[in-house]
Image (cartoon, rainbow, N blue to C red):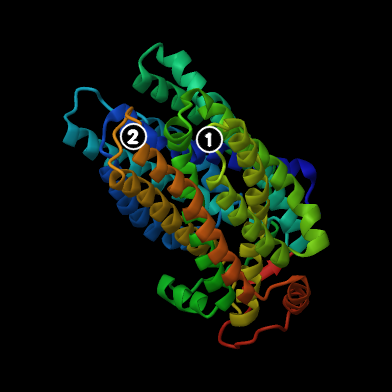
Amino acid sequence: MVSAREKIAYGLGDTASNFIFQSVMLFLTFYYTDVVGIPAAAVGTMFLVIRIMDAVTDPLMGSLADTTRTKWGAYRPYLAWLALPFALTSVLAFTSPSTFTASGKLIYAYITYALLMLTYTAINIPYSALGGVMSAQASERISIQAYRFVFAMIGGLIVTAFMLPLVDLLGQGDTARGYQLTMLVMGTVGMVLFLVCFAGTRERVKPAESNMPSITRQMRILWCNDQCRILCTVAMLVVTGVALRNTMAIYYVKYSLGLPELVTPFITAGMLGSIVGCALAIKCSQKIGKVRLYIWLQITSALICLSNFFIPLDAPYQAIALQFIWGLVFQMSTPLLWAKIADVVDYGEYKTGVRMTGVTYSTVVFFIKVGLATGGALAGWLLALYNYQPGIAHPEVANGILVSFCLGPALASFAVAYLMRGYALDNARLDQIQQALASSTHSPYPEHPVTANRE
């Protein structure tokens, strides 16, 4: 059993990650368009280029982590090694020298955003894989991920509740300076929390000392994992929808609802709902089953997004309440998704005889980043399609933002629910796999001996 104290320590690592992740998801597009002055279409293209470029490095980072051997384990050391660089690059990304020309600001944004995403990959891939080796029990993994995402959403709540007030307080009228100093605060606290996560966790599912296959061989082996292929597609679609909705949230409140003063309450309501949803994930999955529950949560999320389209624009508090409900329902599914990654690692070992924790996590994260790239790029391109101009609220722009905020995420969730019908790793199947893996003689393919020891 993994103690509650250790689960909290692990969760604090995602509090740290979400100081940056949620800042990027919710505020970076707005920062680039309305503070720095970069055109929306250019921002969308930049997100697509950098995020896909960064995503290519994910399997490489996963393979590196899988072959890392230190007295602290394979994955934990990266939390200590990269905590400071992660904090520094987050500040650089929210800094834009005022003396630069328009093209200079765009080039600077490309460079600093690329650095931030590469650093995020280098620390987040090992962090995510760590959750899969803290326990070999499927039920414990759901609990670990539920703790993780409760604390992740707490990090997001801090961002939504305090980001704009801190920008105003620290900037003293200089918005660009306010964002820079706010990210300095967020990055410093995040660095400390990553160190706490490093000190408070333990790796229990340990790889053998034998050499792993080459990265190309690992990719071929991973392709044999049909359940991983389904999960990768699901993750990409899920994140495309949520990235589009979260990016559009500020624009929706400011231009569609016409109430910029409600931006902080609106996004905070969604984050509060997310915390409740993550906390409910364990008990609900125990009663319903995590595969069936995941499908119904996605269908319900889609219906909520659709209903959002029909809320009168002069009823902002209904919109805030619905955002809370959407956050609760949608984020209840997030711990289930990440627990499934650990399950497909076991399934892959059962099927091929090779355990590839880091590579599997990093491959799913690759598709998550493709989703981030797609959702972020769509947001920028759609704003440009609507002829968006910062500070100017045209009715056709407000309506276009409303459509993007509501209908795009709904379509993504419906598609995910459909694809999950082919996912076969329910609790009964996982019990069979765990029993087979517990046998030292299990090796479906003799040329690939079992490569993991379990405590």
Q: Identify the mark at residue 199; answer none if there is no mark.
A: none
Q: Can residue 360 be seen in this snapshot?
A: no
Mark closer to the chain start, 1 or 2? 1
Which residue corresponds to mark 2? 394
Q: Which image quarter is the C terminus in? A: bottom right
Image quadrant in which you'd find residue 203: bottom right
Q: Position of residue 116 (x, y in %)?
A: 39, 41
| Relative depth, front residue between 375 and 353 | 375
Q: How many marks?
A: 2
Amino acid type, mark 2: His
| Relative depth, front residue between 83 and 47 | 47
Which residue corresponds to mark 1? 19
Element type at mark 2: loop
41 on left or right of 443: left
Image quadrant in which you'd find residue 32: top left
Q: Position of residue 172 (x, y in %)?
A: 41, 11
Amino acid type, mark 1: Phe
444 on left or right of 410: right
